[in-house]
Image: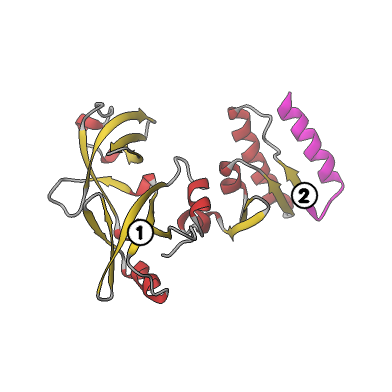
Amino acid sequence: SGGQRQRVAIGRAIVREPKVFLMDEPLSNLDAKLRNQMRAEIIKLRQRINTTFVYVTHDQTEAMTLGDRIVIMKDGYIQQIGTPREVWGHPANLFVASFIGSPQMNLFDAELLKNGDSYAVGLYGAQFPLSEEKQSKLREKNAAPGTVVVGVRPDHIALCRGDSGPYIAAAVDLSEMMGSSIHLHVKVQDKDIVMVLATVDLPDAHRAGFCPGETVNFTFGRDMIHVFDKQTKCILT
């Protein structure tokens, strides 16, 4: 089987006691279940023999779970180097932001608003204040008001009431029950947005899903909003 051949190949490499292992998409030919098993085996193997592993992969799940540090490349150029947590939480540009994470980050055209030394983003008629940390980065870069791209991960979108602060109203397109979470697909005007909602946090009426066409209100946390330069596509916050 494919898994047996993978194990034999790794075993042949181990007996040579190399200083570095280079693996080129080692799990690409395996089915989903075996891929998960082999991924865990490779992690345990690396911990046991304490040797450097270099993986080449197009699968972001492999990169995030197998790597201590990740080098993300596009067209032969390095886009970002960092730990899995760094590239997920602090993407260097729009390519990294949209490549890392599943479902991928929601990206919106928005307005960067400035009032004195304070920054906020305007999106679909609502104004969302930014955290002090993100405002400080904008001040350091002397960011000017204008059109930007705002990114928010599906996990960082929360449903809310219409009287609990800035929010956006959306129409439910479809909902995917994933067990511990629901992947909720909504539309705002012509924009498709995906949010990941923990089932345990939902009211009983929505734990089985949402009805297509239903209206929901959602918001973002102040420190969960990423602001990108629309021209350079680089992170501003």
Structural crowding at the residue carrying mark 2, measured as other residues with C-alpha within 10 Å and reported as few (<14), some (14–19) or many (≥20): some
* Identity of the residue drawn at 62% across and 26% down: 31
* Identity of the residue drawn at 71% across and 38% down: 26
- In the rendered image, residue 90 lying in the magenta stretch gets the answer no
First in sequence: mark 2 or mark 1? 2
Does any portion of residue 3 appear in the rendered image?
Answer: yes
Of residues 8 and 109, which is closer to you in this image? 109
Residue 211 in percent (x, y) is at 24, 26
Does any portion of residue 69 appear in the rendered image?
Answer: no
Q: Quadrant of residue 121?
A: bottom left
- In the rendered image, residue 2 lying in the magenta stretch gets the answer yes
Of residues 206 and 194, which is closer to you in this image? 194
Residue 147 in percent (x, y) is at 35, 59
* Residue that sits furthest to the right in the current view: 16
In this picture, residue 14 sits left or right of residue 212: right
Which label is found at residue 169?
none
Structural distance between the alpha carbons of marks 2 and 1 = 46 Å
* Identity of the residue drawn at 36% across and 29% down: 176
**Is residue 50 positioned above or below 99 on the image?**
below
Helix, strand or loop status at disc 1: strand
- Disc 1 marks which residue? 147
Region in magenta: 1-21
**Is residue 190 positioned above or below 144 on the image?**
above
Residue 180 in percent (x, y) is at 37, 35
Amino acid under label 2?
Answer: Phe
Q: How is the image coloured?
A: secondary structure
* Number of the front mark, 2 or 1: 1
- Disc 2 marks which residue? 21
Q: Quadrant of the C terminus?
A: bottom left
Helix, strand or loop status at disc 2: strand
**Main SS of residues in magenta:** helix
Q: Are marks 2 and 1 in contact (CB under 8 Å)?
A: no
